[in-house]
Amino acid sequence: QVQLVESGGGLVQSGGSLRLSCAVSGRTSDYYAIGWFLQAPGNEREGIVCINSHDDTTYYTDSMKGRFPISRDNAKNTVYLQINSLRPEDTAVYYCATPYVAWCTGHDASSFGSWGQGTQVTVSP
């Protein structure tokens, strides 16, 4: 069973940057996809980006393009989400997840079967 552990969240001032990490373990295939989501207080979980392992193709939600570069280190089984130019409205719990299939199929949270525990990002004005 795949396990995902996010880290790197914290308190940051508006305009700053953070790099979140998603460590992946327990997978049974060399091919997998990782999606990043955020959930602000009182809101539903919202997709940011998904990356395929076999070709590093990335798929962004339109509203998230530009400030959330994603990268991966296959040797470390870790996927990174950089968040630039942070704003108070970015305050949320950030999750990584794997879809039920081995490739990105969109940003619907219901298509993702394994989730990490989330990491809190708080942006002060």
Image: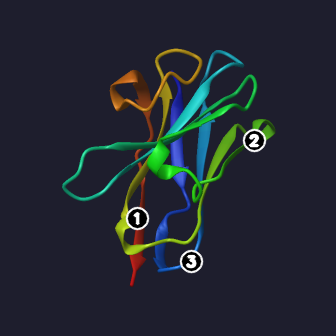
Q: In this view, does 4 lie to the left or right of 39?
A: right
17 or 62, which is in the foreground? 62
Residue that mark 3 sits on: 16
Q: Judge the density around disc 1: few (<14), some (14-19), many (≥20) Cα neighbours within 10 Å.
A: some
Residue that mark 2 sits on: 76
User: Residue 124 placed where, x, y %?
Assistant: 39, 81
What is the count of numbered marks? Answer: 3
Q: Distance between the residues labelled 1 and 3?
A: 11 Å
First in sequence: mark 2 or mark 3? 3
| Residue at figure coordinates x 47%, y 27% from the top left | 106
Look at label 2 and name its amino acid: Lys
Secondary structure found at label 1: helix
Disc 1 to disc 2: CB gap under 8 Å: no
| Residue at figure coordinates x 40%, y 71% from the top left | 122
Secondary structure found at label 3: loop
Q: Residue 21 carries which label?
A: none
- Outermost residue toward the front? 62
Q: Quadrant of the C terminus?
A: bottom left
| Residue at figure coordinates x 59%, y 71% from the top left | 17
First in sequence: mark 1 or mark 3? 3
Disc 1 to disc 3: CB gap under 8 Å: no
Q: Distance between the residues labelled 1 and 2?
A: 27 Å
Q: Which is closer to the viewer, label 2 or label 3?
A: 3
Q: Judge the density around disc 3: few (<14), some (14-19), many (≥20) Cα neighbours within 10 Å.
A: some
- In this view, 6 is above or below 101: below
92 or 1, which is in the foreground? 92
Look at label 3 and name its amino acid: Gly
- In this view, 50 is above or below 92: above
